[in-house]
Amino acid sequence: MSPDDCDGARGDSRLSGDAGLAGRVVLAGLETLTLEGTSEALNELAGLRSWADAMEALIASRLLDLTRDVLPPRFPAGSDREDMARSVAASEVALVLKVPEGAAARLVDESVRLNEKHPATLGALESGAISRRHAVLIAEESLGMQGEAAINFERDLLDHARGLTVPKLARRARRLREAHHPETLPVRKAKAVSERHIELRPDDDGMAWLHAYLPAEQACGIYERLTATARKLKLPDEPRTLGQLRADVFTDLLTSESAADGHPAWQGITARVNVTVPVLMLLDVLKEGESNGPGGNNTVDGAEQVPDARGLNQFAELEGYGPIDAETAARLAAHAPSFTRILTHPVTGSVLDVGRETYRPPKHLQDWIRARDRTCRHPGCNRAAFGCEIDHTVPWARGGTTSHCNLACFCAKHHMYKSEGIFGYSQPSPGTVVVRTRAGTIRTSTPDPP
């Protein structure tokens, strides 16, 4: 099994001449593989994957070059045009590979860095000697290094990368970096500190990850303080694990008005809440009351106390996250200082089309559009609707109407893409948005049902 085992079939009829991919690879005789054969096959697949990753880097770099050429001339030359080209190229990659735009932007940046600054590392990746993770690590650890120092640093890492896992290579790279880097650690740290940020990543089952990129001493200090406090709470009759206690202490410190006020952590959350909730479900939960609800003892766990409410098998939608259970929706509604209630129980009378009477949608129509769309309608964009602009799909100046079938939520970036003609958008049916890129990619975005 190798890239040479091809049948000559053209991979895509849109590819002209000798451009693009040709042929296919097959795995033959799976049932006849010996134990040694399975190991050899896995090694061959790893090499094939590395080759594909190297080709992806070359294609992504080429895509960026071509994107620069097709940007409208009103974008001036210089850093602004380059930033715009990278942004548009990342959006194209995101649509093609069906990945978030942040991940696509990283792929484009890593590809350009490997192609332009680290041809030796890219060559090792293409040959199958290293994986993409090895290659990206070498390129990232080389940032800021110049001249002979950069060449020697890359060569040293490549010499060892073939026999090391990525974590072991990372440790070696950090040691070598101090020996080769022209800038002192304090100077580099001052630059890195400017990149500090917090990131929220939704997960399954009503949970989410909260990531923090911080100076190492602050991150370690925060973790040690959480651990020390959690250990003090780990009494003989405490059922929670040390990990659960760390999480509860973290939550209480950031959400409770007082760490010892005796109230559950969620009562300290005073965020603006947009929750789409079936009204009958909410009424069922509120009727049951919260006397048996989770919480108490300064914990957000409460896993042992589950109320018996008729609506608990249904779910509501928390804007910016996704489905949450009925009791949590009722709790947020009760304690948030302000929230928008969009009831999905059948009601009538809402005016969803004001035609050409006004350019600006009435407030109730704006609320309806945001409740329908929930996020920016560019395929794959997860910017919450309350932070987006409501835009006419067919522009008002070209006869577009102010109606639910011609309005959609777009974040500032994708709204600009549409206004500048970088991407084309249409809405063939109410709520269904289709995007077409200059490269010919077509993707459809349909809002989730309430």
Image: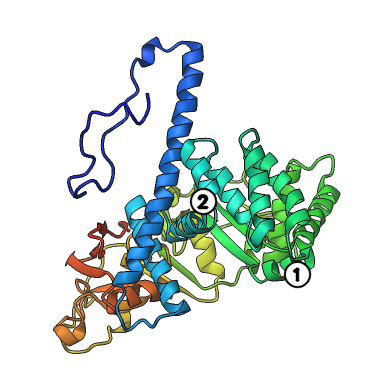
Q: Position of residue 148 (x, y in %)?
A: 67, 57
Disc 2 marks a residue whose amino acid type is Pro
Question: Residue at (68%, 66%) from the top-left corner?
Answer: 192
Question: Residue at (26%, 48%) from the top-left corner?
Answer: 19
Q: Is residue 440 left or right of residue 118?
A: left
**Where is mark 1, residue-wise?**
187
Disc 1 marks a residue whose amino acid type is Val
Q: Position of residue 204 (x, y in %)?
A: 49, 47
Q: Is residue 10 left or right of residue 201?
A: left
Q: In this rendering, does residue 288 appear at all?
A: no
Q: Is residue 405 left or right of residue 191?
A: left
Q: Position of residue 169 (x, y in %)?
A: 67, 42
Residue nearer the viewer, 347 or 383 = 383
For label 1, the SS is helix
Quarter where residue 84 is shown: bottom left
Question: Residue at (18%, 83%) from the top-left corner?
Answer: 354
In this view, 173 is above or below 363: above
Q: Is residue 239 left or right of residue 38?
A: right
Check the picture and name the quadrant holding the N terminus.
top left
For label 2, the SS is helix
Q: CA distance from mark 1 to mark 2?
A: 28 Å
Judged from this view, the residue extending furthest toward the left is 399
Quarter where residue 224 is shown: bottom right
Residue nearer the viewer, 304 or 285 = 304
In this view, 270 is above or below 289: below
Quarter where residue 81 is shown: bottom left
**Where is mark 2, residue-wise?**
119
Question: Residue at (74%, 56%) from the top-left corner?
Answer: 180
Residue nearer the viewer, 102 or 322 = 102
Nearer to us of marks 1 and 2 is 2
